[in-house]
Image (cartoon, rainbow, N blue to C red):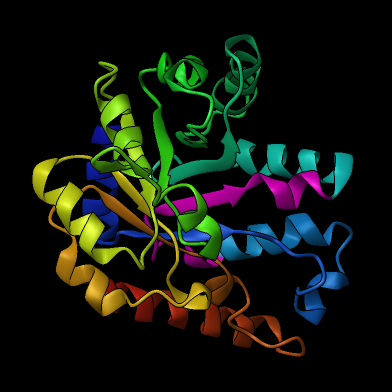
Amino acid sequence: MDYKNKLKKTVRKKNSHLIAGIDPDVTKFPEFIYKKKNPLYEFCRFIIEKTSDLVAGYKFNIAFFEAEGHIGIETLEQLLKEKKEDLIYICDAKRGDIGNTSEQYAKAYLDKMNFDAITVSPYMGVDSAEPFLKRQDKLVYVLALTSNKGSKDFQKLWIGSKLFYELVIEKFLESGYSNLGFVMGADYAKEINRITSVKENIPLLIPGIGAQGGDIENLMKNIKNDSYLINSGRNILYAGKYDDNPKIYEEKVRLECVNLNNAIK
């Protein structure tokens, strides 16, 4: 099953457009997790097990695993071996390099780890993303308009009569690949309105709600297609307190997911 069909099926089955961001900061886990042999693995597994009925899937921020060295990579691989096939698994790696290097990234994340999708930086051009795009059952989310403050440094520069991010989107859509989507920050509601009005089925990955301050009510008024996923990481992962017992922490995590789902609907 290709990604776009899986996306439709998953959103319908789970009745959710919510993606939980797996950004496991080892300094922020609840106390009961630190008693485990591998707290990194146990925390991620806990979050996935307790939310899998409430979300459409998970976005794994690779940096948080790489930061822990071989234990982090082994943990990531183990979590992916336990992949739930009725959920979306996105690799947030923001890769993008010359073709033969990108091919190795594609082999690692899309072939061996079997992620459903990956985030890619467009700065080196369309050919730097082609090794990912050639895996046509996977989806490539190209960074277009991101939610960080510095996004305006380049993404909002005028190039002739168009903004740089608009040219990025145009160039990739002209590439002929259909397994494309874009990352657009939640605080750019008007821009999201524009692209989803013109491109009815273009998949969007939308970060920036919750801890990053995006206005979810305004965002929902401006999304004009049904192929979007909205990511929330820290608000879900760290919904509980350090000294909460497992049951209380679980309840707080699940409540955050429920509240987010209600806001999205």
Tell me if 33 is positioned left or right of 148 in this view: right
Image location of residue 239, percent across then percent down: 58, 81
**Which residue appears at 26% of the width and 52% of the height?**
11
**Which residue appears at 76% of the width and 74% of the height?**
28
Give the residues drawn in magenta, as a range: 50-67
Tell me if 141 is positioned left or right of 217 in this view: right
**Which residue appears at 16% of the width and 40% of the height?**
201
Tell me if 211 is positioned left or right of 242 in this view: left
Specify the quadrant of the image occupied by residue 177.
top left
**Which residue appears at 55% of the width and 59% of the height?**
150
Residue 54 painted magenta = yes
Image location of residue 102, percent across then percent down: 60, 19
Tell me if 94 is positioned left or right of 43 in this view: left
Image location of residue 59, percent across then percent down: 52, 50
Image location of residue 136, percent across then percent down: 36, 18
Compared to 53, does 95 lie above or below?
above
Specify the quadrant of the image occupied by residue 126.
top left
